[in-house]
Amino acid sequence: MRHASTYLPAAEIADSVRRGERAAVEVVEEHLATIAEREPEVHAFNALTDAQARMAAELIDRRVAAGEDPGPLAGVPVALKDNLCTAGVPTTCSSRILEGWLPPYDATVVTRLGLAGAIAIGKTNLDEFAMGSSTENSAFGPTHNPHDASRVPGGSSGGSAAAVAAGFAPLALGSDTGGSIRQPAALCGVVGVKPTYGRVSRYGLIAFASSLDQIGPLAPTVADAALLLEVVAGHDPLDSTSVPEPPPSLVAGLDDGVEGLRVGVVAELMGQGVAPDVRRRVEAAAEALAGAGAKVEETSVAALAYGLSAYYLIAPAEASSNLARYDGVRYGLRVDAPTTATMNVATRTAGFGPEVKRRIMLGTYALSAGYYDAYYGKAQKVRTLVIRDFAAAYESFDLLLSPTSPTTAFPLGAKAADPLSMYLSDVCTIPSNLAGDPAVSVPFGTGDDGLPVGVQILAPALAEATMLRAAAVLEDAMLDQAMARAEATP
Ligand code: GLN
């Protein structure tokens, strides 16, 4: 497997650490040095766990010296979205309301990373409670796009995407409720995977919208994203929504190509609102897949046109319920007041930012007596149509193709005052969450502004292996072009 030359792949780092050729301590110091250099400009992290990372690296090196194998991610630094619980390490969701709260346990993904020899290097910035598409809704200030610091990194996993793009960590974990892994991956020029609902345990992921949330990898290359997904995926008795299937084998078949695969370009996700330069990159991706032997055709998945509207009822409805637990008693912040009820109000008023309050109000309204059927109930019916239309499309196609985000990275502040235009950033990614299906964003060149464009490959449930094979074909096509350009330049 080839790779983008500026990054040392996680797999290579792990191999050299396992063989004792490189010290994990050295790997960690190198990444901390890169962070020291550029973090003031990027602000990818809410907190670094540098002391713990150094200790973990020493332990890895001692185990290698003793002839043990620390695992497939030995010595590889990983950045963790700050809505993943880390025992004894602040986990804030970029919200004031969790101020001072220390999780009493690790998320299952964090435990699995540790068992694979990976080293948690820090907690990354996000839109508060993962609500947003630009990381500007963080209580701790925005993250900046490493390709252009005046632009957003996307969101809500903007810190994780920026950390990978800036070389702060070879790997990162994010969470994706409506696009929060894929859209920032697209805007930062990295690979981002939303796995099938239930593929990765969400035990210890702070809930936003429980029927949609999924954890997944961000990485510079498809192979590294696949490797990280293999490590964190698989059944977990601690998450009742986790699927019983064994963890998928993804890396082994990545080079198998797309010969004979049927790929549908989704008409509903190529129309109005998609910038022409982004659309051209998706068309180029369709050609690249056809050139590699896939049968590519345009297709229609009609109900996707209503996905965004359904999501903005279902996700806030679930959020309004999930966020009821932040009452000033059980977690973090408490603003004292004479009675329990006024203390609850004072705490939530001070602790939540404007977007979180907007979602709680939208969701409470959609669920309230008299409106439930018209809003929440109707949205659930649309969700069923989305599931049905996807299932029909997958009778004729193995995979679907679309843009990940309708535009490249927009300037900081450009959409902050207009929630609706911000919501539209996720029009292409939301349908996969409604259906519970996997999707990947893979970098495929740049837009007219020179900023990264991601194309999205969608697959039916549990078909991550096929989906990532196609992503690898697109990655190879870009490397071929880059090499041809390099040869043509004297
Ligand atoms: N941007 C979408 C929202 O604001 C999706 C967020 C996510 O996937 N966490 O809800």
Image (cartoon, rainbow, N blue to C red):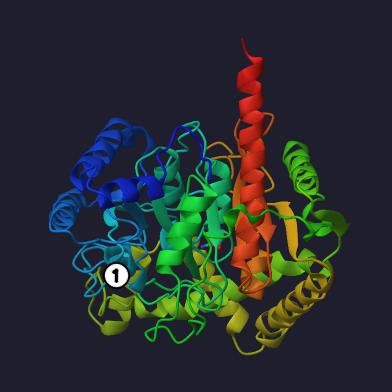
Give residue 439's position: percent from left, percent from top.
62, 62
Residue 327 shown left or right of residue 176 in the figure: left
Evaluate whether residue 133 shows in this view.
no
Q: Assess disc 1: are there few (<14), some (14-19) or many (≥20) residues with their C-alpha within 10 Å of its C-alpha.
A: some
User: How many marks overall?
Assistant: 1
Q: Is residue 189 left or right of residue 403?
A: left
Name the spot of residue 415 as percent of width and height, x first.
59, 45
* Residue 342, horizontal then vertical, whole percent: 31, 78
Quarter holding residue 366 = bottom right
Say which residue appears at 64% left-offset and 37% top-offset: 478
Determine whether 93 is above or below 39 in the image: below
Q: Nearer the viewer, residue 152 or 296?
A: 296
Dot 1 falls on a residue whose secondary structure is helix
**Quadrant of the rendered image holding ligand 1:** bottom right
Q: Is residue 19 visible?
A: yes
User: Which image quarter: residue 394?
Assistant: bottom right
Comparing 443 with 354, the one in front is: 443
Up-down: is 140 above or below 300? above
- The quadrant in which the C terminus is found is top right
For mark 1, what is the residue? Answer: 111
Q: Is mark 1 within 8 Å of ligand 1?
A: no
Q: Residue at x 38, y 39 (%)?
A: 167
Q: Looking at the picture, how far across and down is residue 391, in whole percent?
A: 77, 76
Residue lying at the far bottom of the rendered structure: 369
Q: Residue at x 20, y 44 (%)?
A: 23
- Name the residue located 75 percent from the left edge and 43 percent from the top edge: 288
Q: Is residue 277 left or right of residue 140?
A: right
**Residue nearest the viewer, comparing 148 with 138:** 148
Q: Is residue 397 above or below residue 258?
A: below
User: Could you tell whether 386 is left or right of 131 in the image?
Assistant: right
Task: Give the amino acid at mark 1.
Answer: Thr
